[in-house]
Image (cartoon, grey):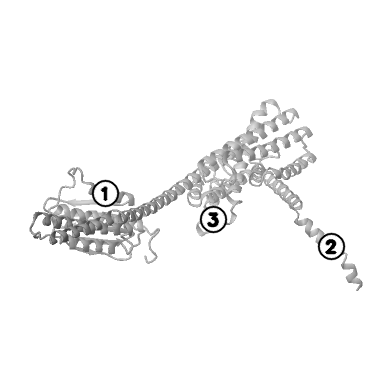
Amino acid sequence: MTTQAHLYPTQPLVRRAAALAQSPSARYAAGLLVLAAAYYGSAKIGQTVRYTASVAAIWPPAGLGIAALYLWGLRWWPGVFLGELAVNGELLVDETALPLGSLIGQQAGNMAEIVVGALLLRRLIGPRAALDRAEQVFGMLVALGIATAISATVGTTSMLLGAVIEQPEALTFWRTWWLGDTAGALVVLPLALAWVPEPAAARRRICTWQGALMIAAVGGLGGLAFSIDGPVTYMVFPALIWAAFRFGPAGATLSIAIAAGVAVGFTAHEAGPFSTQPIDLRTLSTQIYIVVAAVATLFLSAVVIERERSATELAEGKRREDDRAMKERHRIARDLHDSVSQALFSTVLHTRTAQKALEGEGLTRASPLEQSLDAIGELTRGAQSEMRALIFELGHDAVDEGLVAALTKHASMLRKRHGLDIDVQGPEPLALSPRAQTELFGIGREALANVVKHAGASKAWVRVEARSGRVLVEVRDDGSGFDPSARHPGHFGLESMHSRAAELGGVLTISSAPRAGTVVRVETRADTEGASDDA
């Protein structure tokens, strides 16, 4: 009982502590501490591989701070300030401590760099940019160039005023500072933009055997290039290009970070082609190497993604156009059924009524008026039959049952109407999208129409083949033939066939000669996208 009595008063305290931990202000404070620790940690990484006690080739905190404020908002600036304060606090107690005024100027310049960089990024590339467009990469470069120039200018000025550097050293000092912050930002910021918003998607793209091979290739080639004192420094670029082409921004940014880490690490440990240079040239060479590698890889990745997006949008646009065309065909079929078809039906009825009325008046079937009515009735019924066929064709997709089935049905119709013997052969189903089957059916139908109208043939053959990822449609006849190289004014059928083949990315060839028949052949890639489930 005594133990329980002592426990009871602590329960409200536990609940209050839990509620406090879940409050927005507590979460914000914890987030600031995490950001400050991450900023401080990235600074220590940069200092670990510095070339001398005061010269670091890259400064990763610049990219980390800009990324944090860009992704999560400017309200997180105190976390960056705390991290920067911790870094400068160490410098203040160091044996080679900088003057307090120079440290204050350095911190002010770094804070301005990060805040201005985040603001410019939001202004130039918008929120949550994925660096999948060339203009976004360009906007990021402009924002980083301006922001890091502010830090370099303020920092150099504070060092001059604190007598840390002399006037002749100012330009070299400014250049090293600017390129160091820019190189660090180009490594960390794109990596954060590509991975932080959707880490699972980025991880899925990289966590494959090809992704592991890419990482090994970048690290291996980079290490090999900096292990040899020879003109092979940029041999890692093929691996960077592969990462940009195959893995998009996620792979491109990761490969940049790996290549930069290898270059700085080897050079800091007195290895590689840059290590033999004087300190200022060594730093400059490393920074230029990282900047060139990052800019080239990021732009290439963005261009590849843009091309993929354009191809996808083009395919989607064609699909929407096909849907709209189908709806328009159905609308025309309904309008024809409700107007022209009904008018033809009424004409047939009125013709029959007039014929019966004339018969009641005793006119013979041989009279001119009766013969004219018979002709009108026959023509109207023919037009009505043609109209029904047209309405059916417009209202239904001819290739619903497959390409070969549609060609067989069309051949049967031509055989009945024109007496042309047509043999159709081919496999079903085909690994073709409905759109591709529709275009190939249109080519076959147009070729058979030319056989009926112009060839004077007694027989035609239609052959459909699927082989080695290609589909072939061939229409051959034993007719009079023609000269394909000659101009045929007004022959819109040939133009239509060539246009349909071009839409599919196929090749249309016509082989013919006078009195030797004609062969129309179209070959295209087997397009499984959107193909029927049976295929």
Q: Which mark, by number, is residue 12?
A: 2
State the quadrant of the C terminus.
bottom left
Tell me which amino acid carries mark 3: Ile
* Mark 1 nearby-residue class (10 Å; few <14, some 14–19, many ≥20): some
Q: Which residue is mark 3?
A: 206
Seen as rendered, the residue at the extreme bottom is: 1
Counting residues from the start of the chain, the first of labels 1 and 2 encountered is: 2
Q: Classify 230 as above or below 343.
A: above
Q: Does residue 423 appear left or right of residue 162 in this picture?
A: left
Counting residues from the start of the chain, the first of labels 3 and 1 encountered is: 3
Q: Classify 412 as above or below 48.
A: below
Counting residues from the start of the chain, the first of labels 2 and 3 encountered is: 2
Corner quadrant of residue 372: bottom left
Nearest the camera: 454 or 38? 454
Tell me which amino acid carries mark 2: Pro
Question: In front of the other: label 3 or label 1?
Answer: 1
Q: Which residue is mark 1?
A: 496
Give the percent coordinates (x, y) of residue 38. Answer: 70, 49
